Amino acid sequence: MDVEDVFSSRLRIKILKVLAQVGELNVSEIARRLGVNYGTTNMHLKVLEDEGLILHKQFGRIRIYRLNQNSAKIKLIQNLFEVWENQNK
Amino acid sequence: MPLYRSVFKDETKLDINYVPHRLPHRDKELRLLTEFFNFTLQSPGAMSQRVIITGDIGAGKTALSQRFGSDISREANKRGINFRYVHVNCREYHGSLFLILQHVVSAFHPNFPKRGYSAEELLPILAQMLDEENGYVILALDEFDSLVEKEGSEAVYKLTRLQETRQNKPQRLSLICILRSLEAIGRLDPSTRSTLQSSIISLGKYSEQQLIDILNDRVSVAFKPLAVLEDTMSLIAEIAFSENGNARFGIELLWRAGKHADAEELEAVTPECVRKAVSNIVPAMRKDELAMLGFHEKLFLLGIARLFKESHNAYVSLAEAERAYAIVCEELEAKPNSHTQLWKYLQNFLSLGIIKTEVSKTGVRGRSTLIYLPRIPAFELERELEALLEDREA
């Protein structure tokens, strides 16, 4: 997937941002925090995971997502969030 | 404004949650506990352990377990073992296995969802987490009787037999069960009991001299030099000894006496400060135990306290207590709970030692439960409960 495809979605950026802030969350909680429904969240999570930006762990019926810290892209994205937040302070 | 002077150097060292570095007169028990869990450091995963710590209020059960937990965690981390000591007060979690397990899981995954699964699902989830992170846990279940009371044998059985469903995998969960008397263990079914009763550490009552040693240790870290007179220490130790050797009571009394000394701008804590402090402390009961009671439990107990305050009788009947509770509920606009629920509350008060009960004997028609308030002045109890209920409303 090209970079513009990943970043073209406001929700995908929001998901990355919330995971960068909180560390790890299950699907319903991500959906609740972003104010969107479970299905939509799930769909975007799949895109981000296919791109290797996030990972999930399955505990029974519960899936917990976190950023893939081994991805060079995610390190850059986290950096981008930090710089952005600091400049806006 | 005059310069504020205090007898305290660091009053947090007298807080109920403070775990001292040294446990006077409990070294033998600490060594024994360390021996029981030696395998955690030597060969983690090779086995799991269940230990019972028992003893009266203020005998040092919680402090012993927490000191041990802190020591073993430090040692395990030094050796690169992913180990956690998780201390849970079962009463705080209303004796619910689900809530207790959720607390343990949150030690590994703080944002793990709070809803959407059962206790049965949580146990394998915890095992999976521990397997994936190569982690080991000693779960200390403080006020264990509360778990037994709420969940019965089944929950304890599940906890102790977790490993049986995980054949040939490392043993990752050990238990420390902390309780005042072994009576609760007796209520478990024989198979569950047998999994628990292998290692028991019984803490005896502290002597007056031992209490002085404990208080001395705390004084040295909590107070400025020479701020507590020797006579003050003896008096506190004497009172704590008469309260069944309750060290916690002694430490709380020490803190209160210090507060009186500060309020009167004294340079040292005198026996008179202790006498003043003891007159407004709720004896034989920890304030936090009252605070931990549920809303309706507080209302019911407030009703009982008011009944005793107004009557000169040594006891009140359960029916009278229920009527007094209904009045308190009306006052606070709460819907009264049923008789069965009130009966359960009464059993809880009984196990906490707040009340005593007796079944009426001859001369009274039928059989009714009589409630006694043996050691706590009714007006003190009323005042404490009203303050707690006010805090809740604020």
Image (cartoon, coloured by chain):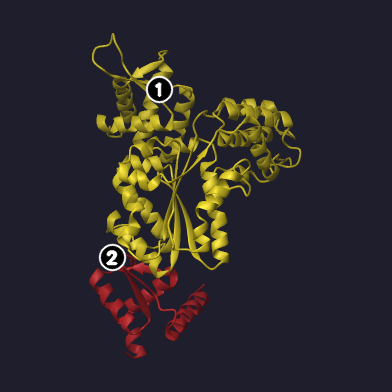
Using the rendered image of the protein, determine whether residue B117 is visible from the camera's viewpoint: yes
Instruction: Tell me the element at label 1.
Output: helix
On the question of residue B338 being in view, the answer is no
Residue pushed farthest top?
Answer: B363
Callout in the foreground (2, 1)? 2
Q: Is residue B62 above or below residue B249?
A: below
The residue under label 2 is: A60
Chain name for mark 2:
A
Q: Amino acid at mark 2?
A: Gly
Q: Are marks 2 and 1 on the same chain?
A: no
- In the displayed structure image, the side of residue B106 where residue B271 appears, left or right: right
For this rendering, which residue is in front, B106 or B158?
B158
Where is the N terminus of chain A found, in terms of image quarters?
bottom left
Q: Where residue B30 appears, x then y in whole percent?
A: 57, 47
User: Dot 2: few (<14), some (14–19), or many (≥20) neighbours within 10 Å?
Assistant: few
Q: Which residue is mark 1?
A: B306
